[in-house]
Image: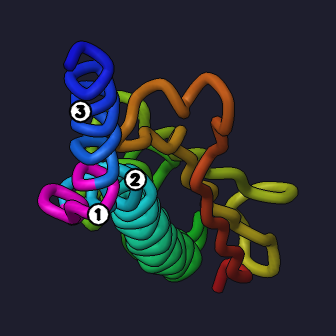
Amino acid sequence: MNSKRNLKERTGWLTSFRRLLRDDNGISAIEFAFAAPAFFVLLIGSVDVARALSMHASFGYAAQEGARYAAIRGDDSLAPVGEAEVRTFVQNRLTYNGDEVSIQVTYEPNGSPGSTVTVLIQRPFNYLIGDLASILSFNVSAQSSFTVL
């Protein structure tokens, strides 16, 4: 009698284990747990790429407008402007403002007609996930040059 009971207990445990292996309740949650991190990394990465491209386009537009503004208003024009006025003009056209934006205006050799004015805009890119900045840091920049009229 004891041997039948021991055999039943042993096979009962085995039967329960087999039933557990066949049961697929909760498998979707486990699959989601494996797939979700990869999905969210790709999603946030795509958003960061879009932000970097948008920032580059904004900087390109502002640099081009600033260089054009400086080229038209050179030293021999009726309303000459200096580097500070060009920086303010460019700053007003940026959609990404802040303390981290660097705007450099240079005249080669000076602001007289025939010289070249160059506007360079730079800013470090801040990721949505802050820890990536220490690993993959880069500057978003744009530059434009015009000949002073």
Label 1, label 2: how far apart the Cα atoms are: 20 Å
What is the span of residues highlighted in magenta in the rendered image? 19-28
Q: Is residue 8 visible?
A: yes
Element type at mark 3:
helix
Residue underneath mark 2: 34
Residue underneath mark 1: 22
For the point 58% across and 77% down, the residue is 71
Question: Is 116 covered by the magenta stretch?
Answer: no
Residue sticking out furthest to the left = 25
Q: Mark 2 or mark 3: which comes first in sequence?
A: 3
Task: Choose between 141 and 72: the one closer to the eye.
Answer: 141
On residue 8, which mark appears? Answer: 3
State whether residue 90 is above or below residue 148.
above
Please provide percent x and percent y for residue 148: 67, 78
Residue sticking out furthest to the front = 1
Q: Dot 1: few (<14), some (14–19), or many (≥20) neighbours within 10 Å?
A: few
Q: Amino acid at mark 3?
A: Lys
With 55 as the anchor, is 102 left or right in this view? right
With 27 as the anchor, is 136 left or right in this view? right
Please provide percent x and percent y for residue 54: 39, 73
State whether residue 109 is above or below residue 51.
above
Q: Amino acid at mark 2?
A: Phe
